[in-house]
Image: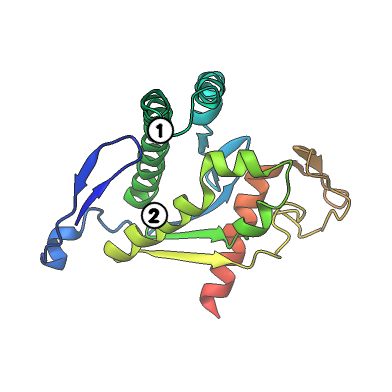
Amino acid sequence: TLSKTKSGNFFLSILIDIPQSEILKFNKTGLDIGIDLGVKNFVITSDDNVFENKHFYKKDEKRLVKLQRQLSKKRKGSSNFNKQRIKLARVYEVITNKKDNYIHSVVNKLLSQYDTIYMEDLNVHGMMKNHKLAKAIQEVGFFKFKTTLQNKALQNDKKVILVDRFYLSSKTCSKCGYVHKDLKLQDRYWCCHKCSTNHDRDKNAALNILYEGRRISAV
């Protein structure tokens, strides 16, 4: 299949059939982990590892605005319009490639260390309706991360188990099970009213996802 991107680059895709043994990239470890996806940090794990949000779009936001402004001043369909359109498309393409590469590097890191990964079954489409979060969610690429993780896990005989999106992973104390119903989105740290344990919101959520994932796997 020959395809052409908006920036004018051509790509040739060739389908080949190879043995399953040649696809396997990651060895078995016998370990499992819970992960929480966030906007401030991209992926937070239950063993306290953090993969930062690289903010690829944010870093080039001013450049994109400038190019879009210049494009709007060109006559649509003209030679100068098409040249400017390609300039803008190339910047978007580079940003997308950087983001995709980072997602693959995070997925590879997780699958090289763990056989089973538990994560929340996030309603990304619903989250995008929140205008305050939509831009940030689109930037980090939750859906792309989820599908990449699931596909690579399947190829390597590993598991991705989804925890119900309505499970209160952030509001539940991972030590005693107390539910802090009044916890707000901006509250990054909180103290359990029952056992007085201090929690980092994201680390606590990742631990709860690990425990809940193990529970549903054992049923």
Q: Residue 183: horizontal and vertical position, in percent?
A: 84, 48
From the viewer's side, name the closer residue of 164 and 141. Answer: 141
From the viewer's side, name the closer residue of 95 and 101. Answer: 95
- The residue drawn where x is 84% and y is 53% is 180
Crowd around label 1: few <14 · some 14–19 · many ≥20 (10 Å): some
The amino acid beneath tag 1 is Ala
Q: For numbered disc 2, what is the local secondary structure?
A: helix
- The residue drawn where x is 38% and y is 33% is 98
Q: Residue 81: horizontal and vertical position, in percent?
A: 43, 27
Looking at the image, residue 61 lies above or below residue 1: above
From the viewer's side, name the closer residue of 194 and 148. Answer: 148
Q: Mark number for residue 178?
A: none
The amino acid beneath tag 2 is Thr
Q: Quadrant of the N terminus?
A: bottom left
- The residue drawn where x is 55% and y is 48% is 46
Contact check, label 2 and label 1, Cβ < 8 Å: no
Crowd around label 2: few <14 · some 14–19 · many ≥20 (10 Å): some
From the viewer's side, name the closer residue of 73 and 30. Answer: 73
**Residue 151 is drawn in which quadrant?**
bottom left
Q: CA distance from mark 2 to mark 1?
A: 24 Å
Lateral position of residue 5 relative to residue 48, left or right:
left
Lateral position of residue 128 relative to residue 113, left or right:
right
Q: Residue 142: horizontal and vertical position, in percent?
A: 53, 49
Q: Mark number for residue 148?
A: 2
Q: Mark number for residue 89?
A: 1
Looking at the image, residue 211 lies above or below residue 104: below
Q: Choose the circle earlier in sequence order: 2 or 1.
A: 1
